[in-house]
Amino acid sequence: MALVLMGLLPGAAMAALWLAMPAEDGPGDRTLRAGVWFGTLLWALTEALSAFGMVKRGPLTVCWAGVGLMAVGMALLRRRVATGAMRWPKLDPLSMVCAGTASVILVLTAVTAAFSPPNSADAMAYHLPRVVYWAEQGSVRFFPTPYLNQIMLQPLAEYLMLHTYVLAGGDGLANFGQWLASLVSVVGVARIAAEWGAGVRAQAMAALFCATLPAGILAGSGAKNDYVLAMWLVTAVYFALRFARSGRRAEAALMGAALGLALLTKATAYLFAPWVLAAAIGGRARGRRRRLLPGIAIAMLCAAAVNAPHYARNYRLSGSILGFDSAQGNGFFRWRNERFGWKETLSNVMRNASEQLGGRSRRWNDWIGTTVEDLHRRLGMDVNDPATTWRWTVFAAPRNSNHEADAPNRCHLGILTIAAMLLWWRAARRRECEMPWYALALVGGFVAFCAYLKWQPFQARLFLPLFVLGAPLAAVFGETGRGRARWVWWGAQAAFCLLLVDGARHPVLDNWVRPLRGPRSVLRTPRVEQYFSDMGQWNNAAAYRDSVAALAASECEVVGIDIHDLQLEYPLQALLRLKRPSVMFVHTGVQNASARYQPPVAASPCAVVCLDCAGDTARLALYSGFPDTQTIGRFVIRSGR
């Protein structure tokens, strides 16, 4: 229990920062300001302590306790000098229903996050393994690894996981980074709507739109980084709107810091952020753009400063500030398209859009898939063109998935489409173009993604930030009517909210890898079994368990792991740490550019686990110095040095 409380220190520090923020602009504004300060401090503390190999429990405890105490002191001082009380919004019944429903969803996803370990396939392959190796070396410096995603991909979401992992002594709080991001995003979209002049009810409906996103609900209890990116982009847009209105350079600095944190979270920010920020600033700053240039320069400097350390590490590794263009560094599984053009872009637009249209009807899904294939044939395009398609995959009809990787957001996409049409119709009549241009910017971000990156299955989750950014547009449905029309509007808005809530039931309760109900509920299933919930296609849970038992019995303190043939190493690390908390891990058999880095542990391994290496004589030949061999399923343990 004491370790869990220590793991909550960063969260307590953020709460203290919230108290220290100015109260004049309401609790939502305070939340976003506190979020930017917290993210910047998280980055600064990690990089500073990392330089001395001091990302350890003691230094982290002192730092976060110090941040919390200073924030509380500032809050007490601010309370003395404040001239006005914080304004809380007055909620009408429908607004209260929206806020209450969003709160219930957030509570249920928090329960799911608490009772489930990190268990998505990506978390098993790189999100959590990089945390383990960082914790061992007390630093976020690069280390040898066959899977370069563990070192070169943007690390900010994992910085928070690292802090809670070290402080709490395990992964019990690893899922709460995404959950916290979902909470801040719900608040942030309401604040963006308020900046556009939306009333309280419209703000509440925008927040409900965000809270009921199926992909968001499923991601909010996991250990990936899509919702974290959405949070920083929402925050950047909010401060961009405020900066464009006031011209204050403090708001520009907050916008730049949020942008920098977004870029440090996930590389898709480079494709999404320019469009929405340009729309937010350009749509509001008519005739004043030149006067805003100094503030924009400050924002760019802040964003660059936040990313500079990771840029430098990537440049030393690969010669590029973004790292290699594939996870193995050889270009075989390259993320970007091999060719660029309107046909390649259109193909990816159709395929990516179709994945958001999956429904419960098999007939509907098959019709969508057939239509996309037919359109490709009519345009003379190959629906599985290798230049724009992830290797070894083929396009298929969408499905009604409750998995965070490819859950469709069909209802929300329809609402956003209608909202955009209404906004452009209004713009034609009243010349109100700020929100319509923002809606068009979201389309620009989607097209940019499709123009640059290959299509692949299970990447519908990557568009979660665009849906979250689109949530403020739903405020257009929250306007209040007058006279008798008021009740018509109220009924229509109530139906709108019921539609959103109905679509949220299954994602909340029936997450395919973290369900709240049923025989596999996270409330009933032992935590150690849940690590394998997203690994059914490999059918190797027994091999992990038996390998852990064999290694625990050997009393080896430094275990080498060869992940050349299978990158899902975290279940082995997590289960072995439960049996032997002092065990350390290093990668072995590394034959790429990262081999020149110092391993996290100086001592040589006394045993090596080669995942999925049974029959791979080339890999096993690397460990001829370990005479004892034990084959467990497709895993091979070499020891006896």
Image (cartoon, grey):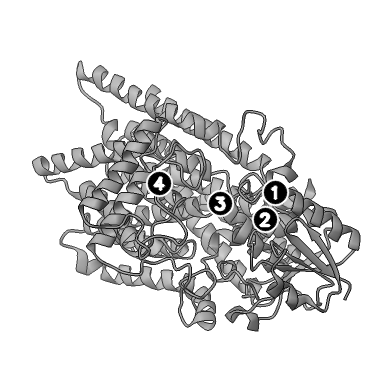
The alpha-carbon separation of the residues under discs 4 and 3 comes to: 55 Å
Q: Which residue is mark 4?
A: 396
Q: Which residue is mark 1?
A: 172
- Residue type for callout 4: Ala
First reached walking from the N terminus: tag 4 or tag 3: 3
The alpha-carbon separation of the residues under discs 3 and 1 comes to: 30 Å
Q: Is residue 39 above or below residue 514?
A: below
Q: Is residue 35 left or right of residue 352?
A: right
Q: Is residue 344 left or right of residue 317?
A: left
Q: Which residue is mark 2?
A: 164
Q: Secondary structure at mark 1?
A: loop
The alpha-carbon separation of the residues under discs 2 and 1 comes to: 8 Å
Q: Which residue is mark 3?
A: 75
Outermost residue, left side: 429
Tell me the quadrant of the picture where the C terminus can be found. Answer: bottom right
Number of numbered discs overlaid on the protein picture: 4
Q: Secondary structure at mark 4?
A: loop
Q: Nearer the viewer, mark 4 or mark 1?
A: 4
